[in-house]
Image (cartoon, rainbow, N blue to C red):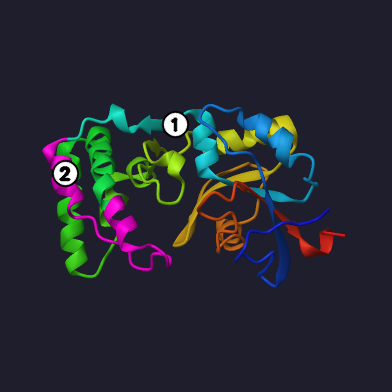
Amino acid sequence: MEYYHNPGKALEIEVAGERYLRHGIRTHFVEVGEDYLDLFRRYVVPVYRPGDWVAVSEKVAALCQGRVIHRQEIQVTWLARLLAKCVRQTPGRPNGYGLWVYRNYVNNAVYNSQFALDQEGRARVLWAALRAGLDKLRGIHGTFYRLLGPEVGGLDGFYGGDIPAYADLGIRIPTEPDLLCDQVYEKTGVQSYIVDANGLGVELMGKSSGITAPETWLTEVIRDNPAGQEEQMTPFILVRRLRDAG
């Protein structure tokens, strides 16, 4: 088999003294409501071997579950606009995040802010914003999303700088990701785990019960986000021990 990796990403990585290959499985551009199991059968099963793991972008899982919200569904309030003005560029954002793109992100932050208000309520959001402001004075970051939980912190979209198709679409986190991974294994025999990966880090969202590797290993083996952040169309990363790659 010919292994593929995206430009700028390494094919091999070493974790805990062992080397692994990360093969980017290319797909078509996945749309809302597609069959998740069919994607595995079509793209993953033909290259999968027992002993492999497959890391899956949470966007694909959520899109297949229909976990999206459209811009026109959100009624923006004055409070959302006020909260959006507090948006600041995340320290350590990858290079290339230019001024125009940043302004576009800030302009669309009103929709993320309104989603938070709709999801958690005005009182809870204001309390989180106050706590976040106080913590920021002490050099502590991330309080706002930590207090409001994964539904708010995990909303992605309303920003077409990386993928234009998502400019008017908010993608929520997948629901019951552990169960989803177990269903994939039951129907296809593929051991998979779902991650939220970007230039700032990797978060494990769910995994099949047959995967006994620790969370630190599962995230470390894709720490550089080999799937990419734009339109690489490699939402599945097959992880294989180099010694098993013959």
The amino acid type, in three-letter code, at marker 2 is Arg
For residue 11, side relative to residue 198 (left or right): right
Q: Quadrant of residue 123?
A: top left
Q: Which of 23 and 205 is in front in this view?
A: 23
**Residue 122 pos. (x, y %):** 16, 37
Residue under label 2: 81
User: Of all residues shown, which one is farthest toward the front?
Assistant: 100
Compared with residue 200, is residue 181 higher up or lower down, i.e. above or below? above
**Residue 172 pos. (x, y %):** 41, 37
The residue lying at 51 percent from left, 52 percent from top is 230
Q: Which of 49 and 86 is in front in this view?
A: 86
Q: How many labels does the image show?
A: 2
Q: Can residue 176 be seen in this view?
A: no
Residue under label 1: 67
**Residue 174 pos. (x, y %):** 48, 37
> Are dots 2 and 1 in contact, CB under 8 Å?
no
The residue lying at 50 percent from left, 30 percent from top is 32
- Residue 89 inside the magenta-drawn segment: yes
Label 1 element class: loop
Work out whether mark 2 precedes mark 1 in sequence or the reverse, and give the earlier one. Answer: 1
How far apart marks 2 and 1 lie (CA) works out to 24 Å
Label 2 element class: helix
Quadrant of the snapshot with the C terminus: bottom right
Q: Quadrant of residue 67?
A: top left
* Marking on residue 213: none
Front position among marks 2 and 1 = 2
Q: Is disc 2 surrounded by few (<14), some (14 to 19) or many (20+) residues within 10 Å? A: some
**What stretch of residues is rendered in magenta?**
77-105
Q: Is disc 1 surrounded by few (<14), some (14 to 19) or many (20+) residues within 10 Å? A: some
Q: Can residue 71 be seen in this view?
A: yes
The amino acid type, in three-letter code, at marker 1 is Arg
